[in-house]
Amino acid sequence: MPISRPIEPLVATDEELRKALEDAFLPALLPALAQATGDFSILRESLRPPGVAPGVQQGGMTPAQQAEAREVAFEALKKLRDGQVAPNSVPIEEALLRITAWMTGSPASEDYIPLLLEELAPEGQDPRAPAWQKDPSVPFKVIIIGAGMSGILAGIRLKQAGIPFTILEKNHDVGGTWLENTYPGARVDVSNAFYSYSFAQKIDWPTHYSTQPVLLEYFRECAREFGVRDHVEFNTEVTLLEWDDDRAEWSVHVRRADGTEEALRANAVISAVGQLNRPKIPDIRGLERFRGPQFHSARWDHSVDLAGKRVAVIGTGASAAQFIPEVAKVAGEVVIFQRTPNWYVPVPHYHDEVPAGLQWLFAHVPHYAHWYRFWLFWNTTDGLLAAAKVDPNWPDKSRSVGPENENLRLLLTAYLQMQFADRPDLLPKVLPDYPPAAKRLILDNGIWAQTLKRPNVKLVTEKIREVTETGVVTDDGTEYQADVLIYGTGFQASKFLTPMRVLGRGGKDLHREWDGDARAYMGITVPGFPNFFMLYGPNTNIVVNGSIIYFSECEVQYVLGCLKMLFDRGERALDVRKDVHDAYNEKIDRGNLERVWGVATVNSWYRNEKGRSAQNWPFNLIEYWQQTREPNPADYEFIRERALAGGD
């Protein structure tokens, strides 16, 4: 069965309609019905949701509003069912403007219309697919490194454009991070209505925030359905990329699982290795002395039985917040060593199944799943970006950086105070003293507080001095005995492309050029490295605004545009101009200094060893979409094969 399904006929009794409406998400259902029926009187001002706030159900609609909205929706559904809907005479652009104005509470910018037409495409259409084909007589091959979310996407688009490609994957299967991270409790922290390809939206996600096995199967399905899997060479790791100045192409050195090595040739290389795939092991004295099993969350050792064991967990980041509650259910004792507490965003339905009525409505109401996706797009992305803005006149930036950020701090503080009201001994340990969004925000449905209150769990905030053969010793001299040691210490996010070596024009070494401070034009191209493109490259990570899949779709569209530009001009390669690259990065740096993560001093993987944010995108989502829609030829120098150009 295909991933994306056509809308099913609306056949139901009045009673069945009312039953389904009990599970409806109303702020997105009313816009869908307005578009489906052409009756925009459905979007009454009295029913407009008041706005965004973490953890607020139904967009903050009051019970009275919800009851009225269900009646309005019921009448519209009956008209759809009974065929009493007149042809919609409202142009799609006007419909989108009306609906977005109602949903967001402000007049919608016409700049958003082209983006919405892509995000809210009619069922079965894919507006972002390339509308062109490479001339088969032009020899050109692309190598993609990595068969995770971005690598699969790049393969899909290259196939649609008729460009030969091979994906090199170091693992035995597709899926990337969702193949590697198999720790208990692993799940996505972006709703699946948004954390999915725009052209392959499922309506039957079992939970709102899917678990690792479900996501892995989704990407496997996409790779199979779009014919990408057959292009993957598994158990093949790239060790070196070397640009050939004479032939104007890349030599890609690989190591197979059996240890054999080979050099492949490609006209262009797309790196889809991601940022969060190389585990970071903490620099603590004595780790090698520990006698029991020890492993990182991203390399979970399922052969280790934790039942009844004394487990020491170092780190309390996003992964640890997911696996610690699961470990605590089976372990005899869990000691958690926390360096910095996290801000937790209340999401009561974080672990909940998608109600049957909501799934039924997605399957039977035109446009509903798309407007639900837009609600998430707006209210969990650009709608929250203001909360990360730095006010230069804000008096004390140690705890918050502006009025919106302060409001968020107060809201999240109240949540923690409520969660730990019965444990005043724990509250000082879990309450951060830095501004929210300076580090990664963690979604929570109350399970973190429940876990820390368990009798077999202890939270330690004293700094670790060393690890011994039998446990962990803190600076105050206390030794905590442990049978198993688990690292929840994150990844080497700022060490882009490691451990690969990348040699560009004239043998230029990319890692030496970066010197620990990775930069790229649009996060995609780097001067001196022609026809080399990065997905999820420098400054394309999102913090409070968006899904990384959205960014990957923008990036792949830009890469395809660059390749088309080469074919249209009859050129061999392109290399971004250094002045263009540098000016762009100056803009990025200024933007990050206007966001909380750029000025806060708390330790965070959002900054590299130079103290700069080489990871994060500081602006809104539409700006990245606009700048990646089509490459500008003036940004690039074009290169021809020397042998063909007479040695020039």
Image (cartoon, rainbow, N blue to C red):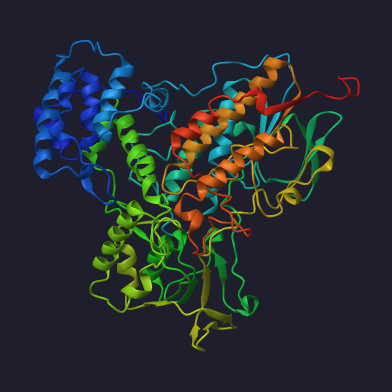
Among the 4 quarters of the image, the one containing residue 1: top left
Q: Residue visible at 74% across and 46% down?
A: 510
Q: Quadrant of the C terminus?
A: top right
Among the 4 quarters of the image, the one containing residue 561: top right
Position of 284 with respect to 396 (left or right) is right
Q: Tell me residue 18's x, y (percent).
A: 12, 34
Position of 261 with respect to 120 (left or right) is right
Q: Residue visible at 25% across and 35% down?
A: 105
Rendered view: 86 above or below 231: above
Q: Tell me residue 442's x, y (percent).
A: 39, 57
- Which residue occupies the foreground of this view, 41 or 194? 41
Residue 144 visible in the shown view: no
- Which residue occupies the foreground of this view, 59 or 146? 59
What is the tally of numbered marks visible in this picture?
0
Q: Residue furthest right?
A: 647
Rendered view: 606 above or below 250: below
Q: Residue visible at 52% across and 69% down?
A: 486
Position of 629 with respect to 37 (left or right) is right
Rendered view: 107 above or below 446: above
Position of 461 with respect to 176 (left or right) is left
Residue 572 visible in the shown view: yes
Rendered view: 504 above or below 132: below
Q: Residue visible at 48% across and 46% down?
A: 542
Q: Tell me residue 644's x, y (percent).
A: 86, 19
Q: Residue furthest front?
A: 393
Q: Tell me residue 511's x, y (percent).
A: 73, 50
